[in-house]
Amino acid sequence: MGVSRSSQELSNGGSTVCLLKEQMEIDPDHHNDEEVEESSGCPHLDGPDPSSFVPQPSGIPSEPQRQFMGRPTYTMTTPEFAVETIHPHSELILILVEGMNEPGESGNPPEPPSWFDRELFDRGREFYRRYLSSVCFSNLLSLVFMMAPKRGLAPLIYTGQSDTPMKALKRYYSTLMHVVTWYTGDVWDPEDDAHKDVMSIRSIHGKVARQCNAPEENEQLRKIKVSERGHPEPESPFYPSIRDDLRHQTESRLLSYNTENPCLYLSQSDMALTQYAFMGLVVAHPEKLGAGAATEEEFAGFIHFWRGIGWLLGIDDKYNFCRGSVKETRALCLEVEQKIALAFLAEADWNYEHMATALLTGMSYIAKSMSFPAMFRYLAYTLDISVPSFVKRMSYRQCFYYWVWVITFKLMWFFPRLTSLTSYAFGSMVYHIRGKSHGKTIRNGVCPRAAASLMKHS
């Protein structure tokens, strides 16, 4: 398979809901593209059975369903990462690292596992309803945070589906609609739209993995830069300040990537870190994100919800980020932040800054106070790290936006009722957009420019 043809296929493929998997950035609206041939040269993952299809709900791309009968095999002769052992690490995070060379499809059957607790799972769905605005805001912060590792950022750049504000806005909207479908429906009922949606995403992950792990594409991904997409570095970017402020974070790093060697994309570890992106920040730092009033029982339900979603998406329970108690999961979140995410953020470059800026500029069409400087500073505040060099570079307007978020979440901390009201208002806007985007027009709750973009691709 030639690189040019594969690149086109990647650009026209299906949508993925994951963050590191949302990294794959495959367009959900062009799902009739040519399937990747089984002889495409990728030895990493078995393909889905082309003859096996399930009906898809309205608005969900039709994709062949994978037969979950076994685990794909993969052999990596030259690992693309090394584990540093100077600092002590927990057993949970070391197990997570083991999954770097394990294919993301484990072969889990799409039915409730033995550990599944329906009452606890439904409690997690209720957590979404009560803290929707907090969770969605934390998801955006996580995107800014988890774009830093090169293995996560490269597919975003390569596919060219998130490198402009409008593309990024559409991408986050698509991701949000998937998650809304999951927590409002019954993902365990084969006849429910939510179940079909999860299975569709799981099938798409397999397709994307085969494409990204094919030898020629793998090599291209390791070398890709945003400048090749027509986004040259400006004279005065922010990333040197990030490097300066976080230079000491590399001392506690757990992983060191070798970008010269093959990388297994959509591995078990990638899938698990995607779980963190959807729930980690709000679990580890609830008081900074408007969920300070949540009880341990509510967090237990939220974590169990994502353990179940992870199972349905093909994550082996050994690597499932949410398999522990609330205390264990929170500790794992903090360790991942310190020993993986921050260490890579300390090596931020123009590729990272451009993609994060595109995302937040796109979101600013809906919420004016969204900007890369303001959100990055709030991320630093959430993680309790000092970024003086970065703050000096910020304009008065960007600092104002930052303080808007600080005051908003402080008020939500002191007045928990405000959290519910905010989530209700945000949920109403989401449902309004969701309903109108499948029919006629979008008028209220989103600016005309953003609405036009969403309608164009819905």
Image (cartoon, grey):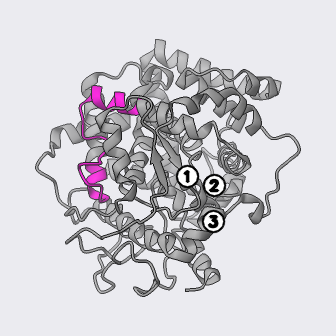
Picture disc at residue 158: 3
- Please state the horizontal and vertical placement of residue 419, each as a whole percent of the image: 45, 25
Along the line of sight, the residue nearer the viewer: 280 or 420: 280
Left/right of residue 187 with respect to residue 130 in the rendered view: left
Which class describes the residues within 10 Å of circle 3: few (<14), some (14-19), or many (20+)?
A: many
| Residue type highlighted by circle 2 | Ala
Q: Earlier in the sequence, mark 1 or mark 3?
A: 3
What type is the residue that disc 1 sits on? Tyr
Residue type for callout 3 = Tyr
> Which residue is denoted by mark 2 in the rendering?
168
The quadrant in which the N terminus is found is bottom right
Q: Percent from the top left, x then y, of residue 300?
A: 26, 31
- The residue carrying pointer 1 sits among few (fewer than 14), some (14 to 19) or many (20 or more) residues within 10 Å by Cα, namely many
Q: Residue at x 52, y 82 (%)?
A: 33
SS at mark 1? helix
Say which of marks 2 and 3 sits in front. 3
Res. 264 image quadrant: bottom left
Residue located at (57% from left, 64% from top): 440
Q: Find disc 1 in the rendering and name its residue.
A: 172
Q: Is residue 456 visible?
A: no
Cα separation, mark 2 vs mark 1, equals 6 Å
Q: Which residues are magenta?
A: 308-334
